[in-house]
């Protein structure tokens, strides 16, 4: 999918974020992080990562729900997921899952090696199934809870896709958070604003709302909340979804220390 032209049609203010306790438990978050790094994960970091994953999955489900509503359906099917991603490039996350899902077959573009030879999909997947793909089933309970919160259900194939995207996204978040700790902060940072041709540019975000800290505090053995926020900035496009994910993660951890 990443090789296709983006056709962003962001959901905008009509999207209602689901606040409250994340359906993805801290124990699940820490298990995913253990697959990626030996670093300790603080309690607030686990809560922040769970919150960000919830926000992203809620946006994906909302987009699929809107696509299904056009056919007067409340049961989501994989086609609704593809439509949601085509309409809103901000939710194109967890892309490693696409190589393992029949839903995205033929939509993952073409990769060439150094000699200009096409790399088969089976080689792009790798010889071993990644832990994020193998462990995707762990997210099923949380995904089903999010579906219920939006008043919809989904066929098993759609649930599996949402499980996989959630698992890969959180794994990518863990990898980037560990990188932030190792490097002592975010070395390179920017923001991307998506604008349709002929439309006016949106207002810029407040000057400090998306800024990544130039350096981190704390030791080099523990992932803390601010490392999760920095990883979120890396993983998500600069836009409404990223801003909402950061805001909700801060709110989810406001009663704990930043550690």
Image (cartoon, rainbow, N blue to C red):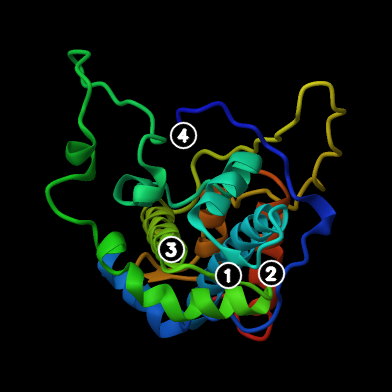
Q: Judge left or right: residue 244 versus residue 199.
A: left
Residue 163, how many percent across, how many down? 42, 66
Percent across and percent down for residue 166 are 45, 63
Gap in Å between the C-alphas at discs 1 and 2?
10 Å
Q: Earlier in the sequence, mark 1 or mark 4?
A: 4
- Residue 139 quadrant: bottom left
Q: Quick one: SS at disc 1? A: helix
Few, some or many residues within 10 Å of mark 1 (<14, 14–19, 20+) = many
Residue 53 percent coordinates (x, y) = 53, 66
Mark 2 residue crowding within 10 angstroms, few (<14) / some (14–19) / many (20+): many
In 3D space, how far apart are the residues under numbered discs 2 and 4 (Cα atoms)?
27 Å
User: Mark 1 near mark 4, Cβ–Cβ under 8 Å?
Assistant: no
Question: In 3D space, how far apart are the residues under numbered discs 2 and 3 (Cα atoms)?
Answer: 16 Å
Q: Which residue is mark 3?
A: 170
Please give the residue where the numbered disc 4 appears in the rendered image. 2
Nearer the observer, 146 or 39: 146
Tell me which label, 4 or 3, sits earlier in the chain.
4
Kindly identify the residue that appears in the image at 77 percent across and 60 percent down. 15
Which of label 4 and label 3 is nearer to you? 4
| Horizontal and vertical percent position of residue 240 | 73, 51
**Number of the front mark, 2 or 4:** 4
Mark 2 vs mark 4: which is more N-terminal? Answer: 4
Residue carrying label 1: 54
| Residue pictured at 64% horizontal, 32% vertical | 7
Label 1 close to label 3 by CB (< 8 Å): no
Residue occupying image coordinates x 62% and y 56% = 64
- Marks 1 and 2: CB-CB under 8 Å? yes
């Amino acid at each position: 999918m990443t090789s296709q032209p983006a056709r962003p049609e962001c959901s905008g203010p009509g999207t209602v974020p689901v606040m409250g306790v994340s359906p993805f438990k801290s124990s699940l978050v820490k298990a995913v992080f253990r697959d990626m790094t030996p670093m300790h994960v603080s309690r607030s970091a686990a809560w922040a990562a769970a919150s960000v994953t919830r926000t992203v999955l809620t946006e994906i489900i909302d987009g699929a729900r809107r696509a299904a509503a056009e056919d007067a359906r409340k049961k989501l099917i994989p086609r609704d997921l593809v439509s949601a991603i085509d309409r809103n490039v901000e939710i194109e996350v967890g892309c490693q899952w696409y190589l393992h899902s029949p839903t995205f077959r033929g939509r993952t573009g073409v990769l060439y090696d150094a000699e200009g030879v096409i790399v088969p999909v089976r080689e792009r997947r790798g010889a071993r199934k990644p832990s994020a793909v193998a462990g995707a089933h762990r997210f099923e309970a949380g995904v089903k809870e999010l579906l219920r919160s939006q008043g919809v259900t989904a066929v098993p194939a759609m649930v599996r896709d949402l499980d996989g995207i959630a698992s890969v996204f959180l794994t990518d978040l863990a990898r980037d958070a560990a990188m932030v700790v190792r490097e002592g902060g975010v070395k390179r940072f920017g923001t991307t604003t998506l604008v349709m041709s002929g439309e006016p540019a949106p207002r810029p975000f407040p000057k400090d709302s998306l800024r990544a800290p130039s350096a981190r505090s704390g030791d080099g053995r523990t992932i803390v909340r601010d490392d999760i926020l920095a990883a979120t900035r890396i993983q998500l496009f600069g836009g409404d979804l990223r801003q909402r994910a950061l805001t909700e993660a801060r709110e989810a951890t406001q009663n704990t220390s930043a550690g």
